[in-house]
Amino acid sequence: MGRLTYSAIASLDGYIADEHGRWDWSVPSTEVHAFVNDLVRPARTHLYGRRLYEVLVAWETMDDPAPEMRDFAQIWRGAEKVVYSTTLAAVSSARTRIERSFEPGAVRAIKAQGDCTIGGAALAGEAMRHGLVDELQLLLSPVIVGGGKRALPDGVRLDLELADERRFDNGAVYLAYRVQS
């Protein structure tokens, strides 16, 4: 059985976007970007909410000369992607399909095929509510934004064990927690 990992870049006060929907404060440094690439590289499948998919689909055609950018584009293009949306009419990336509803059994079947990631706070929250998330990986940016889109859901209790941590030169901190059963 593969593992389902929720990864997010968040402000120190726990938001992935500020109250105006901006997330420019979370753009990773070269060092952090390379680290994130190594985190997501082993995942066979990426599960996304619609909004996150619409941001990340740029990697389908991005041709940035920076090594960490090229590397992430290759990771993105090589992975299977599932987008959960009731409104998205079609996908614009290869190896991508739309699911109209979140079905825990279908996610378990995806996990059975290998490691996968889940992105998008609302979608990840739903997976947490169903006991599907095995690990949380948070990259905390050295900024407080005061409100916006929360990285972690309300109404979910998970007991966690610290699995890894790392500090970066730009002040970001990585924390990985295994979900305790």
Image (cartoon, helix red, strand yellow):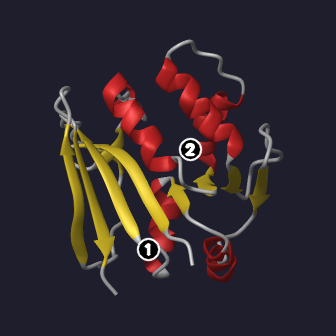
> Which quadrant would the N terminus be assigned to in this image?
bottom right
Q: Judging from the image, what secondary structure is the residue with disc 2 in?
A: helix
Would residue 140 appear left or right of 63 to someone viewing this image? left
Q: Judging from the image, what secondary structure is the residue with disc 1 in?
A: helix
Measuring 29% from the left and 79% from the top, which residue is drawn there?
157
Q: Residues within 10 Å of mark 1 (few under 14, many from 20)?
A: many
Would residue 34 appear left or right of 111 to someone viewing this image? left
Image height of 172 relative to 79, above or below: above
Q: Which residue is mark 1?
A: 128
Measuring 70% from the left and 56% from the top, which residue is drawn there?
82
| Residue sitting nearer the eye, 82 or 31 | 31
Residues under labels 2 and 1: Cα distance? 18 Å
| Residue sitting nearer the eye, 162 or 107 | 162
Q: Residue furthest top?
A: 65
Where residue 154 sits, quadrant-wise, is: bottom left
The x and y percentages for residue 111 are 61, 73
Where residue 28 sits, quadrant-wise, is: top left
Would residue 54 appear left or right of 149 to someone viewing this image? right
Q: Which residue is mark 2?
A: 52
Q: Residues within 10 Å of mark 2 (few under 14, many from 20)?
A: some
> Which quadrant would the C terminus be assigned to in this image?
bottom left
| Residue sitting nearer the eye, 18 or 125 | 125
| Residue sitting nearer the eye, 75 or 21 | 75
Where residue 135 sits, quadrant-wise, is: bottom left
